[in-house]
Amino acid sequence: MDRRERIGKTPARLDFLQSFTGIALALFISFHLLFESSILISKEAMYTLTQFFEGYYFFGQKYPLIISALAAFILLLIVVHASVALRKFPASYRQYRAFKTHMTRMNHHDTSLWAIQVSTGFAMFFLASIHLYTMITLPDQIGPYASSERIALDMMWPMYLLLLFAVVVHAGIGVYRLILKWGFFEPKNPKALHTRRALLRSIMYFVITFYLVLGVASLGRYMVIGYSGEFAPGERYHPQGAAQ
Ligand code: HEM
């Protein structure tokens, strides 16, 4: 194959890789926040889910290394996703100024959404790294008491709050833009394009609000448990009759 032909396909391949890793990460985070909210049901529900992910119900024994491996894999997905996305960041002050002027003049909704996606993506370079490093190195310290201790007493809640906003907004806008880009939601009649896009945007705002409320409520619950004084630092939660 001639070299020009190969170069010609590269941007499309990179775009596909960005969309694919983005969708995988968005799916991961939507399930992650749902599982995390099990603490709103009860401490036992969260404990049971933690045991499940540590393989207890498959192997009759807990293997926290499974959590480390999963977290390392997610980190790898983020690295690939971010590396591909980096090529679309403004690369110099001049490019940034040009984009800002364009955005202000156009006052175009989707262009502003793109700017929010770039800023939240940038914030996640730092925030997601802190969280994933903890999950990779301390996989056995997850549970109703261990997580509450980290969030409340170890003062990780401001980091989690920022991460929650960044990831939910970033993923919400990302999926919206992806649907537009690949034309999944396009009406047959081009005249309906504007209303269809507005509907899609309303769905996006609804989903973002749902996950933000759920995430803040879960964080609040961990804080209440953490500050309740019902466990000593380092103590682990064990429901009556459960495996230690
Ligand atoms: C396999 C990888 C991951 C594991 C095992 C994991 C596990 C956890 C756990 C156990 C918590 C509760 C707090 C704690 O114990 O420290 C938590 C909270 C949280 N995680 Fe993850 N996490 C993973 C990946 C991620 C990623 C990639 C993101 C986003 C980029 C993320 C975003 C969050 C957020 C926002 C919270 C706060 C939850 C809330 O507000 O309800 N996590 N995670």
Image (cartoon, rainbow, N blue to C red):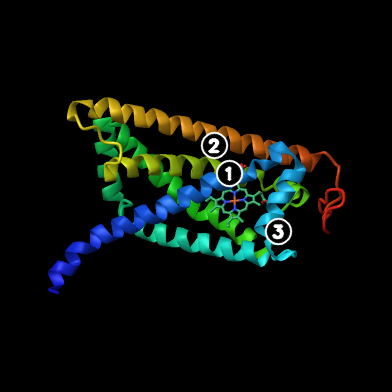
- The image position of residue 111, as x and y in percent, is 30, 37
Query: Does residue 177 appear to the left or right of 70 in the view shown?
Result: left
- The image position of residue 61, as x and y in percent, is 75, 65
Q: Residue at x 37, y 31 (%)?
A: 201
Residue type indicated by callout 3 = Tyr
Give 24 or 132, whichever is nearer the viewer. Answer: 24
Report whether residue 123 is seen: no
Residue type indicated by callout 1 = Leu
Label 3 sits on a secondary structure element that is helix
Determine contact: label 2, label 3, CB under 8 Å.
Answer: no
Q: Residue at x 58, y 44 (%)?
A: 33
Residue type indicated by callout 2 = Tyr
Mark 2 neighbour density, 10 Å: few (under 14) some (14–19) many (20 or more): many
Q: Earlier in the sequence, mark 2 or mark 3?
A: 3
- When asked about the image quadrant of residue 7, the answer is bottom left
Q: In the figure, 14 relative to 200: above or below?
A: below
Report whether residue 203 is seen: yes
Label 2 sits on a secondary structure element that is helix
Question: How far is mark 3 from mark 1, CA to CA?
Answer: 22 Å
Determine contact: label 3, label 1, CB under 8 Å.
Answer: no
Q: Which residue is mark 1?
A: 33
Query: Does residue 113 appear to the left or right of 141 in the view shown?
Result: left
Q: Which residue is mark 3?
A: 57
- The image position of residue 76, as x and y in percent, is 48, 64
Q: Residue at x 28, y 25 (%)?
A: 195
